[in-house]
Image (tube, rainbow, N blue to C red):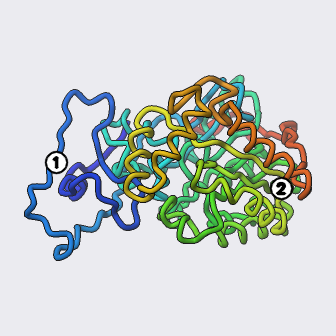
Amino acid sequence: MVDTDPSAYDIIDERLPDRPIKGRGAVSNHVGRFEALSGERVDDGWDDPERNDPPRLRTTVGIDASRTVIARNQSPDVPFDRSVNPYRGCEHGCVYCFARPTHAYLGLSPGLDFETRLFAKPDAPTLLRRELARPGYVCDTLALGTNTDPYQPIERDRRITRGILEVLAEHEHPVMIVTKSDLIIRDLDILRSMAAKDLATVALSVTTLDRGLARTLEPRAPRPDKRLAAIRACAEAGVPVSVLVAPVIPAINDSEIEAILEAAAEAGATSAGWVLLRLPLEIKDLVEEFLCAHFPDRADRVLSLVRQTRGGALYEPAWGKRMTGEGPYAQMIAQRVRLACQRLGLTRRTVGLDTTRFATPRPDRGQMSLFDD
């Protein structure tokens, strides 16, 4: 269940679609696929973009009142079976984010709504502790940041991710974190001690080293140099850290693969991964709009290369193919990553974290036990 204040959102509806908005990734805000009705705003010619600045889109935060926080999956091509996401939606604004379609389940748009109408889970640490205490819970690595970034800007004040880490550290539960933010440095006091017990790993996503391109692709995510600094800080703190070249976007950032891996290795990363651009559900239209708005000279080329890796379609959801694609272009990318990783020593194998230390939380029974010490 999600508690929201609809009156806080009307500013988005005043926007005309198909115009890039400074500081935002999506170009449009079309309704999600589950809505019975849809509308389209049309420019009647009275709006003069040279004279009238468009209204600024505010970020609003509602409360997600979910009663559980551990999400389960059985996907054979991801290295975890459980995850926690402290937030729904993500202000980083990456137009290609595969989590965007989940906003449609809330009756919102995977477009601008996803990056401006956020939902926080303030009870996540308490709920997590409760779920870890359930009879029959079997410990295994828990992932943070698999859907939306746990260190997006609102985490600076909300500190929900930090609360989750405190629970995991208290009960010695292993965690793996994926993020684009150097805010993770704030929590190195927790991660350092967890890593010393083989309980924590971190992966930083670096899509490009070009600050201008990063501002277009990921308008509210930290700059590339800050992410590299976060890799260095994690490595110096003894936290195993890897780099993710994700996503690889044909004809946009594919030329930077080796440079990103070199910079990450120099900063202290010991392993690397990559993901080819994924365009499921509404993301196909969002990315096509984005390319036409920001890269009109190569939009058709990008989409053509994507189709070459997806059997002629824009997306192939099959396990084992959805992350890396297939065909000559995808094979070339895989070969480049493999050779660069060998040359740079980014070949440390990912091993399972220690699950033997886990100490089950004592259930909150609302009163003291007769046998409490």
Report the quarter where the C terminus lies: top right
Badge count: 2
Residue on which disc 2 sits = 240
Residue 226's x, y, as percent? 65, 71
Residue 171's x, y, as percent? 75, 45
Residue at coordinates 54% horizontally, 63% vertically from top-left?
A: 221
Looking at the picture, which amino acid does disc 1 mark? Answer: Arg
Residue on which disc 1 sits = 41
Of 289 and 349, the residue lying toward us: 289
Report the quarter where the N terminus lies: top left
Q: Is residue 290 left or right of residue 231?
A: left
Of 209 and 218, the residue lying toward us: 209
Vertical placement of 309 versus 190: above or below? above
Q: Quadrant of residue 45?
A: bottom left
Vertical placement of 359 versus 138: above or below? below
Query: Is residue 158 in view?
Result: no
For label 2, the crowd category at 10 Å Cα-Cα, with few meaning under 14, some 14 to 19 and many 20 or more, is many
Q: Is residue 294 left or right of residue 267?
A: left
Of 52 and 6, the residue lying toward us: 52
Looking at the picture, which amino acid does disc 2 mark? Answer: Pro
Q: Which mark is residue 292?
A: none
Residue at coordinates 75% horizontally, 46% vertically from top-left?
A: 273
Q: Is residue 211 left or right of residue 199?
A: left
Residue at coordinates 53% horizontally, 31% vertically from top-left?
A: 315
**Secondary element at tag 2:** loop
For label 1, the crowd category at 10 Å Cα-Cα, with few meaning under 14, some 14 to 19 and many 20 or more, is few
